[in-house]
Amino acid sequence: MILSVSYRIFWDFSTGWELRGFWDAVQPWYEGGMGFMRRFVETMRRSWVFSSIITVALGVVLLLYPDTTSTVLCYGVGAVLLFHGMLDLVRYFTRQEGEFFLRYELAAGIILCAVGTFMLIQPEIVTMVIPMILGIYIVIDGGVNVRRSFEMKELEFSRWWAAMVVAALMILLGLVMFLNPFAAAQVTVMFIGVVLIYQGVSDFIILMLIGVWKRRLENRLEEQGGR
């Protein structure tokens, strides 16, 4: 996750460094009146403000209260799954004739009840599995970023190779987390908290960079229109 955020920071800086060539690509969209990039940037900024605040807050909680947070979170998720599974079972056994869309509720209800009950009974085991799940996510994200680095190469970004290196490190980090090298789940939860704080702060930095990038594009558009 750390390397994932670093990759996004690198992507934004690379965009700034390659602004002249990038402008040549997006200028027709602006001049055509579509305003595609303007809407894209504004949407990105709004979503990142909300997500970065939530990410930092969650990271602080995980860092300060690792044991309590992981256990409470496990109990909470387990209770929600168990409740959802029970609702599925109730809907299945109380369905009316002809309601074929509820035919999968029985299997879904049993699975959700089983998973929820296990999380309530064995929260320690579930807590140890979290780093493995997160590791799988980082490996997948790293693979996606490898593809993005090739796209940067096709767009003739001069530093596409650095993005490739960062993506490879992401995959390596994900594999390490999947193997769960930490002896205690508490250390893992605290580490995740630090990562989330870093990611949230990085989002704020990227948000400011996007604002600068947007103003540069608009100023360039005004200069082109004034000629």
Image: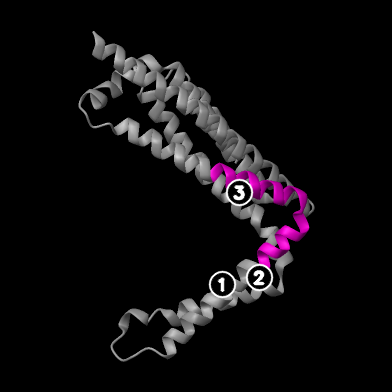
For the residues labelled 3 and 2, the Cα–Cα distance comes to: 20 Å
Asked whether residue 129 appears in the rendered view, the answer is yes
Asked whether residue 66 is drawn in magenta, I would say yes
Which label number is shown at residue 135? 3
Tell whether 23 sits left or right of 137.
Answer: left
Q: Quadrant of the N terminus?
A: top right
Residue 42, relative to residue 114: is it above or below? Answer: above
Residue identified by numbered label 1:
81
Asked whether residue 217 is drawn in magenta, I would say no
Main secondary structure along the magenta-highlighted residues: helix
Asked whether residue 181 appears in the rendered view, the answer is no
For the residues labelled 1 and 2, the Cα–Cα distance comes to: 9 Å
- Between circles 3 and 1, the one closer to the viewer is 1
- Closer to the N terminus: mark 3 or mark 2? 2
Residue drawn 27% across the image and 21% down it: 27
Residue drawn 45% across the image and 36% down it: 45
Which one is in front, 102 or 41? Answer: 41
How crowded pointer 3 is (Cα within 10 Å; few <14, some 14-19, many 20+) is rated as: many
Query: Secondary structure under badge 1?
Result: helix
Identity, as a three-letter code, of the amino acid under mark 3:
Gly
Tell whether 121 sits left or right of 81.
Answer: right
Identity, as a three-letter code, of the amino acid under mark 1:
Leu
Identity, as a three-letter code, of the amino acid under mark 2:
Met
Q: Which span of residues is magenta-colored?
A: 51-75
Report x, y in % for residue 188.
Answer: 73, 50
Residue drawn 62% across the image and 73% down it: 79
Residue identified by numbered label 2:
119
